[in-house]
């Protein structure tokens, strides 16, 4: 799976924060190499949870087929905050991203400022080596990023307005992260119990479900019943053309229009002659009872 450089690029929908009051817990300062408020790089998920409570959504995926480079993203909507834990760093917190104007860097830079004002503030703070990159895409035609390597912060802009601040720990060299001294976080976890399942178990259940369905769909005896669905595949598609790539597991802990406590495993549908042609997912409740399944095919 390709590595996604920008944490907001893989937000699968709108999220809403649990009814925990974090206003007295989260300070508004963004500190280079340290973190945001009391949330610090190097923390484990249990430590973050004591500060922020259970997130609205958790997304788990790997960047490679080997699956030993996993990432776990936690999303908090009211705070407009996304954080990432990396398997390669022993599941420590290593990316923080915010789209909220409540947080500021050096009391000078906040979301919604113009790219001109951000550049001016950075230069006034003494940061001269600003790397500006055009990250335009079909979805976001006016998309730029200012990267300041010496402070480990990327400033993302849409239509020349600061839309997101993303930060990582600082590095001593190419292989050594400078982890901050973690604050002691005392007390019980904030929020409901958080239960996660082995992702491989969920993907195996999805694989079993998929195999059962694709065999049924492409069985000549069922051609009439599934004619509309088959017509959405590239012309001439047979069972031998298809394979499935594991994408992510999502936990919907408090999301509008999603039953609380449900989880979803997603795969890409790959055609040997047409590459990725769609996706399929399976949703379970807290007891691993299937709630629903979804097929999405391009052009359907």
Image: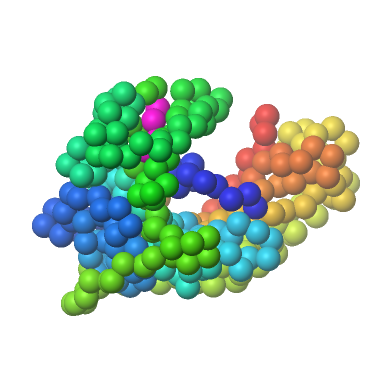
Residue shown at 18%/77% (left/top)? 187
Q: How many marks?
A: 0
Residue shown at 38%/49% (left/top)? 150
Residue 243: give x, y in percent of width and height. 77, 52
> Seen from this angle, which residue lies furthest left?
24
In this view, 139 is above or below 44: above
Q: Is residue 249 visible?
A: yes
In-image side of 269 versus 258 (left or right): right
Q: Is residue 156 magenta?
A: yes
Q: Is residue 239 magenta?
A: no
- Front in this rendered view, residue 110 or 33: 33
Residue 268: give x, y in percent of width and height. 66, 48
- Front in this rendered view, residue 8 or 109: 109
In-image side of 68 versus 98 (left or right): right
Residue 258: give x, y in percent of width and height. 40, 50
In this view, 140 is above or below 59: above
Residue 180: give x, y in percent of width and height. 31, 67
In this view, 3 is above or below 177: above
In this view, 144 is above or below 181: above
Residue 14 lies in what quarter of the image?
A: top left
Residue shown at 28%/39% (left/top)? 126
Q: Is residue 285 visible?
A: no
Q: Which residues are magenta?
A: 154-158
Colour scheme used in the picture?
rainbow
- Front in this rendered view, residue 285 or 243: 243
Residue 66 lies in what quarter of the image?
A: bottom right
By secondary structure, the bulk of the magenta-drawn segment is best described as strand
In-image side of 106 versus 251 (left or right): left
The C terminus lies in which quarter of the figure? top right
């Amino acid at each position: 799976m390709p590595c996604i450089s920008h944490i907001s690029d893989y937000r699968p929908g709108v999220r809403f924060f649990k009814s925990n009051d974090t206003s007295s817990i989260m300070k508004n300062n963004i500190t280079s190499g340290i973190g945001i408020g009391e949330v610090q790089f190097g923390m484990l998920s249990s430590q973050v949870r004591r500060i922020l409570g259970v997130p609205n959504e958790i997304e788990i995926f790997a960047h490679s087929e080997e699956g030993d480079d996993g990432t776990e993203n936690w999303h908090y909507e009211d705070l407009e905050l996304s954080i990432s834990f990396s398997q390669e760093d022993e599941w420590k917190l290593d990316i923080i991203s915010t789209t909220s104007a409540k947080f500021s860097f050096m009391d000078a830079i906040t979301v919604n400022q113009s790219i001109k004002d951000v550049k001016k503030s950075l230069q006034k703070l003494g940061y001269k080596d600003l790397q500006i990159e055009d990250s335009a895409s079909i979805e976001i035609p006016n998309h730029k990023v200012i990267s300041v390597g010496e402070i480990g912060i990327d400033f993302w802009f849409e239509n020349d307005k600061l839309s997101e601040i993303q930060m990582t720990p600082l590095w001593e060299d190419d292989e050594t992260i400078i982890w901050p001294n973690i604050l002691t976080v005392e007390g019980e976890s904030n929020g409901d119990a958080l239960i996660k399942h082995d992702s491989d178990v969920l993907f195996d259940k999805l694989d079993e479900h998929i195999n059962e369905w694709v065999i049924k769909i492409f069985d000549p005896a069922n051609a009439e019943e599934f004619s509309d669905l088959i017509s959405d595949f590239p012309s001439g598609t047979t069972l031998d053309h298809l394979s499935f790539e594991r994408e992510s597991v999502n936990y919907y802990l408090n999301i509008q229009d999603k039953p609380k406590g449900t989880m979803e495993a997603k795969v890409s549908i790959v055609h040997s002659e047409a590459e990725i042609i769609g996706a399929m997912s399976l949703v379970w409740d807290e007891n691993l009872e299937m709630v629903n399944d979804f097929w999405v095919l391009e052009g359907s």
